[in-house]
Amino acid sequence: MQILVRHDDCCFGEKQHNAKATGMNYAEAMREYESRVCEDLKQIGGGSFRLEIDETAPSHMISHQPI
C-alpha cells in the first residue's frame, strides 16, 4: 500500500501535479499510476499494490483518520 496525501505541500501531492502535462486531474493520474504498477506486478509474477489518497491530512503528514 502506498498512501499519497492530496494536500501535501512537499511531495507527490496535488500541488506538485501538472495536469496540463499529463492531461489528467490529480486523482485520475494517481489511479493511472496505480493501474500501471498493478499491471507491472502481474507481468513479473504477482504481488499486490493499492494506492490510497489521503484527503484528510492538511500537509506533509499522514492523518489520524483510518484509510
Image (spheres, rainbow, N blue to C red):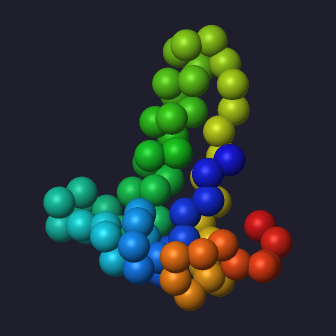
In percent of the image, x 31 and y 67: which residue is there? Answer: 17
The image quadrant where one finds the C terminus is bottom right
For the view shown, which residue lies furthest in the left direction? 21
Is the residue 21 above or below the residue 6 in the image?
above
Q: Residue furthest top?
A: 45
List x then y, in percent, for residue 34: 52, 45
Q: What residue is at 55 percent from the left and 63 percent from the top?
A: 4
Q: Is residue 3 above or below residue 5?
A: above
Does residue 14 show up?
Answer: no
Q: Is residue 47 visible?
A: yes
Residue 23, horizontal then vertical, whole percent? 24, 60
Q: Closest to the observer: 14 or 64?
A: 64
Residue drawn at 62 percent across, 82 percent down: 57
Residue at the limit of the structure toward the right, as seen here = 66
Coordinates of residue 10 in the picture (x, y in percent): 39, 73
- Please report the residue visible at 52 percent of the width from the left and 83 percent of the height from the top: 59
Residue 37 at x, y percent in the picture: 51, 35
Give the vertical position of 19 relative to 7 (above or below): above
Pick the residue in front: 43 or 8.
Answer: 8
63 sits to left or right of 8: right
Q: How many marks?
A: 0
